[in-house]
Image (tube, grey):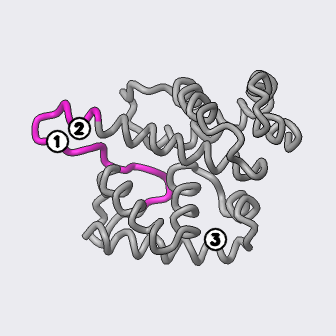
Amino acid sequence: MRGLLEAIGRGDRAGFRRLLPLVYDELHRRARGMMMGERADHTLQTTALVHEAFLKLLESAGKWSDEGHFFRTAAEMMRHILVDHARARASKKRGGGGKKAELSESIAGPDGKEPDLLDVDRALEKLKGEDPRRAEVVTLKFFGGLGESEIAELLGVTERTVRRDWVAAKVWLVEQMG
C-alpha cells in the first residue's frame, strides 16, 4: 500500500481507483465505530460517511507519509463530517444545541451528563494547540472507535502512553467544557 500512496503523492490520480478496494473495509469499520454513538434516526449512513471521507481524501492526495497517516487523516475527516452534520442539524433547530455525545468511550462530566458533540469538537480543537498527540488519541478513540493497541501502533507509542494520554485528555476536556 505504501507504494500506492507514494504514487498518488506523485500525482497518479488513477491510483485512487486501486486504493479504494484496499482500504474500503477498514474505513467502513472505523466509520461504523463512529456511527455507533449516533442517534438511531441519523440521516448520515455509515457508507455515506465512508464515501464522503474518501472524497475529502482525494482532495488531500499525497499528503500522507504512510498507511497510519492515511488512516489518521481519514478518521479526522470523518470527525469533521459528523461535526459539520451536527452543526447543520443544530442550526435547523430552534434554540440550537447539537447532538449529545453518546459514544462508548465517555467523557461525561462529574454530573454524569454527556457533553454536546459540538462542545467536544471545540475543546478538541483547543487541545490540538496545547497537546497534539493527546488530541489525536481522543480523535482516534472517541470519534474513530479504535482500541488502545491500534492507537499505539498508529502513533508509534506504547499502550500505556495511550492510556495515560486518554485519561489526561479526558480530564482536560471535561474541565474545558465546564
Which callout, 3 or 1, points at the residue further toward the start of the chain? 1
Mark 2: few/some/many CA within 10 Å (<14, 14-19, 20+): some
Where 119 sits versus 169, above or below?
above
Give yes or no for contact between labels 3 and 2 (Cβ–Cβ under 8 Å): no
- What amino acid is found at the position of numbered circle 2 in the picture? Ala
**Residue nearest the observer in this picture, 40 or 132:** 132
Q: Residue at x 52, y 30 (%)?
A: 49
- SS state under label 2: helix
- At 39% from the left and 49% from the top, the residue drawn is 102
Mark 2 = which residue?
90
Residue 110 vs 124, above or below: the answer is below
Q: Disc 1 marks which residue?
A: 96
In the rendered structure, are the residues bearing label 2 and label 1 in contact, judged by CB atoms less than 8 Å apart?
A: yes
Q: What secondary structure is found at the residue carrying circle 1?
A: loop
Residue 10, by quadrant, is: top right
- State which quarter of the image contains the C terminus: bottom left
Q: Taking 124 as reference, is 114 left or right?
A: left
What residue type is disc 1 on? Gly
